[in-house]
Image: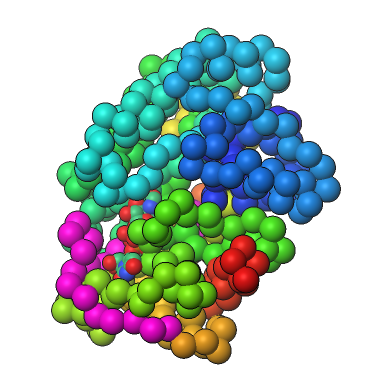
Amino acid sequence: MNILVTGGAGFIGSHSVVELQKVGFTSIILDNFSNSDIKVLDGLEKIMGEKVKYYQANINDASVWDKIFTEQKIDGIIHFAANKAVGESVEKPLKYYRNNVAATVLMIEKMIEHGVNNLVFSSSCTVYGQPEALPVTEDSPVQPATSPYGNSKQICEEIIRDTVQSTNDLHAISLRYFNPIGAHESCLIGELPLGTPANLVPFLTQSVAGIRGQLSVYGNDYDTPDGTAVRDYIHVVDLAKAHVSALNLLLKQPEGRYYDFFNIGTGKGSSVLEVITAFEEATGLKVDYAIKPRREGDVVAVYADCTKSKQILGWQTEKTLKDALGDAWNWQETIAP
Ligand code: WQD
């Protein structure tokens, strides 16, 4: 079966392409390489032992969808392609609504037109904002978005849900990721943040590698055990496997309407200082950091209850925080020795 992976040259997309091949799916990548490097395809070929078919094109271009759906028999889509920088989304909201929302509408219209009826959507725990209760379940209320990025994810979930309800035969799942970190054990693919990383782990590894200065820990006066903010850091390979589980669940559905959404995390919260300690234990290296003021827009704590994913998707994490941090460091050493 052929799976179209939009954003398949990206961090989570590329790791998902590897996991899809392991269970017999053939991936076709659609990526404009605006936030990824075409050299990722070389890494994928080395890991997978075969070239991955790809289209270098924009998801906003209607002719691209007609071309792909005419040239290829597509059995399902995993939709990663989107802009994801929270800060940038505040400065350039229309870029995010065009690339994350309008493009998703176009994709679904083309899916229906061409009879492609299985969709896994890349959503985010950001839809929960600051949950009232932790761990957060899928029944936890979706909070008003605190950024156009987060809003784009909420809007897309609703668009997909509503379209499923109005279409005779469409199956879709939204996966609400927590914080993806780490890299493939081969060190042939991993996270490639463009410019200065906004996220904790890539900045941490670049700081330890001497590419960046001292790591800033944004706030230690939160109402958490050690005062630093808490997140659910999930190994990107575990996250990739969740997409395979979601796809398999969709492909099992009878003709008709199916929509659901799932938390994809470890179920464990880790503070920034705990991540630093875990990194030092995993690598034997010291992290040079300083406590700085809180970062605007950060939530205090968010981590997942993954009971529903375990029970219905048949998926759960296998790797630990230390596994992910060790893999992240090995990857960092590979790309910038
Ligand atoms: C984690 C913690 C920071 C950098 C973001 C997006 C979210 C999702 C994952 C896409 C926070 C602290 C960070 C640093 C630090 N992306 N931190 N020093 O903000 O939880 O989530 O990435 O779906 O949508 O919002 O991840 O890694 O930026 O921050 O202290 O240099 O690390 O304050 O507490 P975040 P993050």
| Residue nearest the observer in this picture, 332 or 278 | 332
Identify the image quadrant of residue 174. Answer: top left
38 sits left or right of 81 in the view = right
In this picture, is 217 found above or below 258? below
| Residue nearest the observer in this picture, 56 or 320 | 56
In this picture, is 69 found above or below 12? above
In this picture, is 286 found above or below 256? below
Residue at 56%, 33% (x, y): give it.
Answer: 31
In this picture, is 212 found above or below 184? below
The N terminus appears in which quarter of the rendering? Answer: top right
Q: Is residue 76 magenta?
A: no
The C terminus appears in which quarter of the rendering? Answer: bottom right
* Secondary structure that dominates the magenta span: loop
Q: Is residue 310 magenta?
A: yes
> For the view shown, which residue lies furthest in the right direction?
49
Give the residues drawn in magenta, as a range.
287-311
Q: Position of residue 168 (x, y in %)?
A: 48, 15
Residue 283 visible in image? yes
Residue at 36%, 77% (x, y): give it.
Answer: 214
Q: Position of residue 131 (x, y in %)?
A: 22, 59
322 sits left or right of 217 in the view = right
Residue at 58%, 12% (x, y): give it.
Answer: 66
97 sits left or right of 176 in the view = left
| Residue nearest the observer in this picture, 88 or 181 | 88
Residue at 43%, 83% (x, y): give it.
Answer: 287
Residue 154 visible in image? no
| Residue nearest the observer in this picture, 314 or 180 | 180
Q: Position of residue 245 (x, y in %)?
A: 60, 47
Q: Position of residue 235 (x, y in %)?
A: 54, 64
Q: Quadrant of ligand 1?
A: bottom left
> How many discs mark residues in the rendered view?
0
